[in-house]
Image (cartoon, helix red, strand yellow):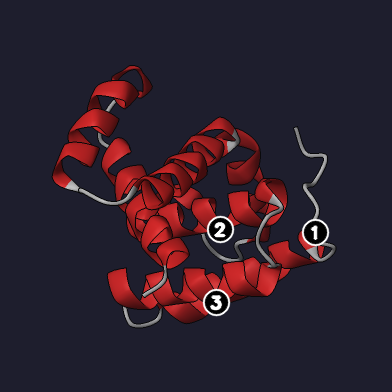
Amino acid sequence: MGKQHRARELALSLLYQLEFYPLEAFEAQSTDFWTGHQVGPEIRSLAEELVQGTLQHRKPIDDLLAAHIEHWILSRLALVDLCILRLAAFELLYYGKTPWKVVIDEAIELAKAFSGKDSGAFVNGVLDKLAALAKDNSPAPLG
């Protein structure tokens, strides 16, 4: 497993954990999280960058996801699937450092590893739609 994949796994775990705490508790929860997950500085730095970016752009990401998820509403999605979609959407639309095909493949792998049996296909379908917005792999002017 590569460093970037591990950083995404940790980012997903932290995003999931943060769903259960108010935003004001971010610093304390993040500190507690890293106490229990000893990794190298490169992995931690990337994971933190992904988490902070996802949280910073959460509202426009959620709006885009809601517009591209057919027959579902965000509040009805499995929380882990929603966190995976938010993380991947951040990478696709704002981060601009990872090719969109890699982002989608990584998100599918996370869904297969941490969610239900059909989650990989679901995540793939949603992210394929978002990839059209990011196909040139440059940060989108979305806010």
Q: Residues within 10 Å of mark 3 (few under 14, many from 20)?
A: some
Tag 1's secondary structure?
helix
Quarter residue 88 falls in: bottom right
Ranked by sequence position, the earlier of labels 3 and 1 is 3
Q: In the figure, 62 relative to 126: above or below?
A: above
Residue depth check, mark 3 versus mark 1: number of the one nearer the observer:
3
Callout 2: helix, strand or loop? Answer: helix
Q: Earlier in the sequence, mark 2 or mark 3?
A: 2
Q: Which residue is mark 1?
A: 133
* For marks 1 and 2 on the same chain, the one whose residue lies earlier in the sequence: 2
Q: Report the Cα–Cα distance between label 3 and label 1.
A: 17 Å
* Distance between the alpha carbons at the discs numbered 1 and 2: 13 Å
Which residue extends farthest left? 36
Q: Position of residue 70 (x, y in %)?
A: 61, 66
In the rendering, at what x and y percent does residue 25 appear? 28, 21
The residue identified by callout 3 is 105
Q: Residue at x 25, y 36 (%)?
A: 20
Residue 56 position in % (x across, y down): 56, 31
For label 3, the SS is helix
**Residue 105 visible within the image:** yes
Q: CA distance from mark 2 to mark 3?
A: 10 Å
- Residue to which mark 2 is pinned: 88
Q: Nearer the viewer, residue 65 or 71?
A: 65
Q: Amino acid at mark 1?
A: Leu
Quadrant (top left/top right/bottom left/bottom right) for the N terminus: bottom left
The three-letter amino acid code for the residue at tag 2 is Ala
